[in-house]
Amino acid sequence: MFRTSASVAFLALVAASAPLQAQQSPARYDAGAFSLELPSGITQLHLVQRKQDPAQMFEGYVGVGVYRGTRVMVMVNHTVHRGLPGDPVLGDSAAARRLLADTSSARWRQFREAPLDNSAAGRRAFMQVMADTSLAMRRVAVERLQYLYSHGNDWIRTEGDGREIITEDRLTRRSPATVDLDSGPMRGTADVSISRRGMETWTVIFAAAERSPALDAAAARMLDSFRAASAAAQPE
């Protein structure tokens, strides 16, 4: 999520993409864990990072191309949460408040990469979170994820409160977004979502070097076409 080897690979992919590509019809792209209809000009997505942390599995996909004469990119970030990190913040309300206030990449990386809390209480708490499929709980998770993108991310930013979208499998917040690249910002739309069951989160972004009504419409069509596969297996 933060500027790591995934963002470096993405920047290289953008730099290497041809400035002009043959316009193609939109095509359904299936990555296994998800599928979506790519805008014309982007033929596929590239897996630029797969990472296993103690508490989660992360995959990042990127595709770049040209749509209506404008450079565009599509990004899909997928995280499967497998347990609670064994971090003191989980048992200390004062530490929890400090974590919420400290949105530095280093602090969040330390939290994410902490060893799993394998205690009976930790596993019970995680299973309770997984079992709570209420919209109220899922909204808290989506709001927290969006907060990280709007305050704690050093190269992807969402803007505003966004619009809530509820489907059978996911709860989503759709917002304007900016991706800051060395070559300049790309602007578009991002869907930040969580599965209605299990603990999978998704961030799907369509961004372009320039904004226009046609590009905004293309972003909405692509985001509406996104489908997640059935939730990944969770620990027993």
Image (cartoon, rainbow, N blue to C red):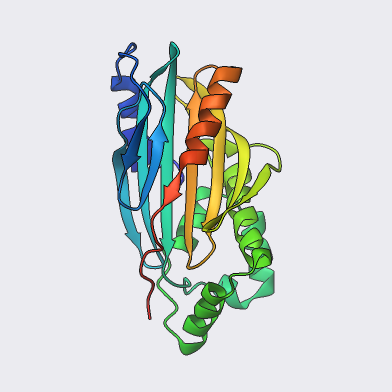
Q: In the figure, is residue 45 to the left or right of 181?
A: left
The residue located at (34%, 15%) in the rendering is: 23
User: Does residue 39 appear in this view?
Assistant: yes
Quarter of the figure that contains the C terminus: bottom left
Relative image position of residue 192 (x, y in whole percent) = 55, 47
Q: Is residue 159 above or below residue 17?
A: below
Give the number of callouts. Answer: 0
Relative image position of residue 13 (x, y in whole percent) = 31, 28
Q: Is residue 129 above or below residue 39?
A: below
The residue located at (50%, 28%) in the rendering is: 207
The residue located at (41%, 27%) in the rendering is: 39
The residue lying toward the viewer, choosing from 208 and 185, is 208
The residue located at (36%, 36%) in the rendering is: 62
Q: In the figure, is residue 40 to the left or right of 202?
A: left
Q: Is residue 216 above or below residue 191?
A: above
- Residue 5 lies in quadrant: top left
Q: In the figure, is residue 76 to the left or right of 131?
A: left
User: Does residue 8 appear in this view?
Assistant: no
Relative image position of residue 99 (x, y in whole percent) = 61, 61
Relative image position of residue 144 (x, y in whole percent) = 62, 56
